[in-house]
C-alpha cells in the first residue's frame, strides 16, 4: 500500500512549489486585468478623440454655413470658422478637464476607502484628456476651413464645404462604429444625416433671421 501511495505523493507539489504556482497564477491574472484595463482605457480615449473631432467638424461647418447664408464673402466665412475653432477647442478642453478631474477625484476617494494604495497611475489623467479633446476639436474644425479657404465663388464654396464635411462625417462615423463595435454603414449614415440636418437648419434659420432683421 505504501509502495502504491509513494508515486502519488511524489507528484504533489511542495509548499514552496505551491506558493510559486499560486504567485504565478495571481501575477498572470493581474497582467490580464491590466491589459483589459489598458485596452478599455485606450478605446475610451480614442472614442473621445473621434467624438471631439466630429464635434469640431460639425459645429464649425454649421457656423460657417450659417454666416454664409447672409454673407457671401469668403473672408467673413473663414474668420467665423477660425473663431469657432478657437472658442470650441478651448471650451472642449476646459470642459473635459473639469469632467475628468471630477471622475479622478471620485475614483481616488473610492480607492482610499477600499484601502488600495496602488494603481493610482492608471486613473484618467485630466491634463491628457483636456489636451486630447481640444486638439481633436481643432483637427475636426480644420476640415471645413481648408475646404473654404481656396474657393472664391460663393456657390462653389458652399458646395465644397458640404462635400468635404460629408466625407469627413462618413469617416468619423465609420471609425466611431469600429471603436464601439457597431454596424459601420448604419452608424456612418446616421452621423452623415445628422450633420446634413445641422448644417441645413443652421443655414435656413440664419437666412430667415437675416431677412427679418433686414
Image (cartoon, rainbow, N blue to C red):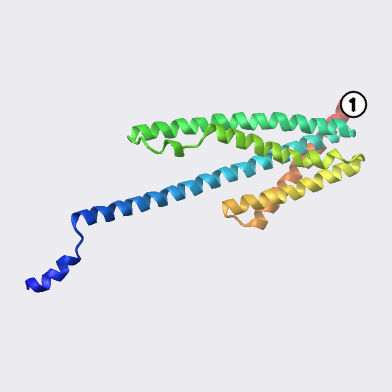
Q: Position of residue 76 (x, y in %)?
A: 85, 30
For label 1, the SS is loop
Which residue is at the front of the view, 123 or 181?
A: 123
What residue does disc 1 label? 214
Q: Where is residue 178 in the image (x, y as percent from the top left)?
A: 60, 54
Between 35 and 19, the one lying in front of the other is 19
Instruction: Using a 10 Å C-alpha cutoff, classify the residue at mark 1 as few (fewer than 14 neighbours), some (14 to 19) or many (20 or more).
Output: few
**Residue in view at x 35 percent, y 35 percent:** 117
Could you tell me which quadrant the C terminus lies in? Answer: top right
Identify the residue shown where x is 48% and y is 33%.
Answer: 103
Is residue 205 something one can see in this rendering? no
Residue closest to the far top: 213
Q: Is residue 97 visible?
A: yes
Observer-nearest of 43 and 69? 43
Q: Which residue lies furthest to the left in this view?
A: 1
User: Residue 67 appears in which quarter of the rendering?
Assistant: top right
Q: Residue most toward the right?
A: 153
x and y percent of residue 190 in the render? 68, 50
| Left or right, residue 72 beside residue 17 | right
Task: Name the quarter where the N terminus is drawn.
Answer: bottom left
What residue sits 86% from the left and 26% below the top? 213
What residue sits 32% from the left and 34% below the top?
Answer: 115
Amino acid at each position: 500500500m505504501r509502495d502504491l501511495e509513494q508515486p502519488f505523493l511524489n507528484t504533489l507539489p511542495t509548499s514552496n512549489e505551491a506558493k510559486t504556482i499560486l504567485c504565478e497564477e495571481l501575477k498572470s491574472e493581474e497582467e490580464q486585468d491590466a491589459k483589459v484595463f489598458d485596452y478599455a482605457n485606450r478605446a475610451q480615449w480614442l472614442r473621445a478623440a473621434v467624438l471631439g473631432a466630429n464635434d469640431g467638424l460639425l459645429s464649425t461647418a454649421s457656423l460657417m454655413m450659417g454666416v454664409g447664408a447672409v454673407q457671401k464673402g469668403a473672408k467673413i466665412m473663414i474668420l467665423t470658422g477660425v473663431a469657432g475653432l478657437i472658442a470650441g477647442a478651448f471650451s472642449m478642453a476646459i470642459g473635459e478637464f473639469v469632467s475628468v478631474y471630477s471622475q479622478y477625484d471620485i475614483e481616488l476617494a473610492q480607492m482610499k476607502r477600499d484601502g488600495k494604495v496602488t494603481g493610482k497611475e492608471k486613473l484618467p489623467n485630466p491634463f491628457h484628456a483636456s489636451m486630447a479633446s481640444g486638439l481633436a476639436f481643432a483637427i475636426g474644425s480644420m476640415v471645413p476651413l481648408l475646404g473654404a479657404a481656396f474657393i472664391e465663388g460663393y456657390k462653389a464654396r458652399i458646395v465644397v464645404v458640404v462635400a468635404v464635411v460629408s466625407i469627413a462625417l462618413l469617416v468619423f462615423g465609420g471609425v466611431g462604429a469600429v471603436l464601439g463595435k457597431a454596424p459601420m454603414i448604419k452608424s456612418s449614415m446616421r452621423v452623415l444625416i445628422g450633420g446634413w440636418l445641422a448644417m441645413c437648419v443652421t443655414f435656413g434659420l440664419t437666412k430667415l433671421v437675416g431677412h427679418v432683421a433686414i
